[in-house]
């Protein structure tokens, strides 16, 4: 039995394809299979388009980052509800509520093998929530499902010489994402630097991959080799 936490970037719930529900359906099927082999899975869902839209609409009239963060958190809870209801409908033993804190989420793990949540409090993103849930629940690793195939040392969209990494130490990764601070509500880099700092302190393994490719999520959950970036301590490297 393993405990694994997944951070699902909110953009994954709005793939620009015709059959866009198919992504969610496949995710549900992967989670259902892992519950059958007694894994415990925590899923932390990002805000995606509703967070971006809500923050952009309000920013010109709301001069307070905490308030804007709370709009983002509401969007993460909306997206978490979509994932939770889809799992429940497929018969997966998922927690009945969307917890508001890491503490509440770890308690729900005592009742059900799958817990789905969004954001918690202002000042960070759902990557940091997922990393903290992984640490608090004794998870083996935290899998960050984004929409880039690996971690690059600079933005590959602007820099054609950007180098992709298959493996990094926590310190190398912190160097790439920058110092542990939350500067503003809304879109951030590949992984929240505050979460990376927490993963470093707790020596938590991070797997960063393109969540649009289900086979990569599945391999990372199963502890198999996957296409993406693994972040581990110097010793395990
Ligand atoms: P996301 O976790 O989706 O962050 O939360 P993001 O960086 O904008 O999106 P990705 O990772 O690129 O997909 C959306 C917003 O909600 C607020 C933040 O403002 C964040 O930018 N938020 C979220 C919080 O303040 N606290 C939380 O626990 C989660």
Image (cartoon, grey):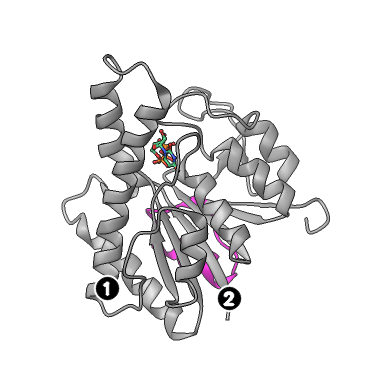
Is residue 36 or residue 154 the one in the foreground?
36
Q: In whole angstroms, how far apart are the C-alphas of marks 2 and 1?
A: 21 Å
Q: Secondary structure at mark 2?
A: loop
Q: Please determine whether, in this image, residue 200 is positioned above or below residue 223.
A: above
| For discs 2 and 1, the disc positioned in front in the rendered view | 1
Is residue 34 or residue 101 the one in the foreground?
101
Q: Quadrant of the N terminus?
A: bottom right
The residue that appears at 27% across and 80% down in the rendered structure is 91
Q: Quadrant of the C terminus?
A: bottom right
Q: Is mark 1 within 8 Å of ligand 1?
A: no
Image side of residue 231 versus residue 189, left or right: right
Q: Where does residue 164 sit, x and y in percent of width and height? A: 60, 40
Instruction: Inspect the magenta stretch and tell me whether residue 225 lies in it.
Output: yes
The residue that appears at 76% across and 52% down in the rendered structure is 233
Q: Where does residue 17 sit, x and y in percent of width and height? A: 21, 49
Image side of residue 155 versus residue 51, left or right: right
CB under 8 Å between callouts 2 and 1?
no
Q: Where does residue 118 sit, x and y in percent of width and height? A: 39, 51
Where in the image, quadrant-wise, is ligand 1 located?
top left
Q: Residues within 10 Å of mark 2 (few under 14, many from 20)?
A: some
Residue linked to disc 1? 88
Q: Please determine whether, in this image, residue 27 is positioned above or below residue 63.
A: below
Instruction: Inspect the magenta stretch and tell me whether residue 212 lies in it.
Output: yes
Tag shown at residue 2: 2
Q: Is residue 235 visible?
A: yes
Specify start and end residues of the magenta stretch as a single range: 209-227
Q: Secondary structure at mark 1?
A: helix
Q: Is residue 168 visible?
A: no
């Amino acid at each position: 039995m393993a405990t694994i936490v997944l951070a699902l970037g909110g953009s994954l719930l709005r793939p620009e394809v015709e059959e866009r529900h198919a992504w969610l359906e496949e995710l549900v099927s992967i989670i259902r299979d892992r519950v059958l082999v007694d894994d415990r899975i925590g899923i932390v869902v990002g805000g995606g388009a509703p967070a971006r839209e809500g923050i952009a609409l309000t920013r010109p009239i709301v001069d307070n980052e905490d308030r804007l963060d709370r709009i983002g958190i509401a969007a993460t809870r909306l997206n978490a509800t979509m994932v939770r209801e889809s799992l429940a409908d497929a018969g997966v033993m998922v927690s009945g509520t969307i917890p508001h804190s890491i503490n509440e989420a770890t308690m729900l793990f005592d009742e059900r093998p799958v817990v789905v949540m969004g954001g918690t409090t202002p000042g960070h993103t759902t990557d940091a929530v997922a990393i903290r849930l992984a640490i608090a629940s004794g998870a083996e690793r935290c899998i960050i499902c984004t929409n880039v195939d690996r971690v690059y040392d600079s933005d590959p969209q602007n820099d054609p010489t950007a180098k992709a990494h298959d493996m990094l130490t926590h310190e190398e990764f912190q160097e790439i994402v920058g110092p542990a601070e939350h500067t503003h509500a809304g879109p951030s880099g590949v992984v929240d630097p505050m979460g990376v700092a927490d993963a470093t302190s707790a020596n938590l393994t991070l797997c960063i991959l393109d969540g649009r490719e289900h086979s990569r999520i599945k391999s990372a959950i199963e502890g198999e080799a996957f296409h993406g970036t693994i972040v581990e301590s110097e010793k395990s490297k």
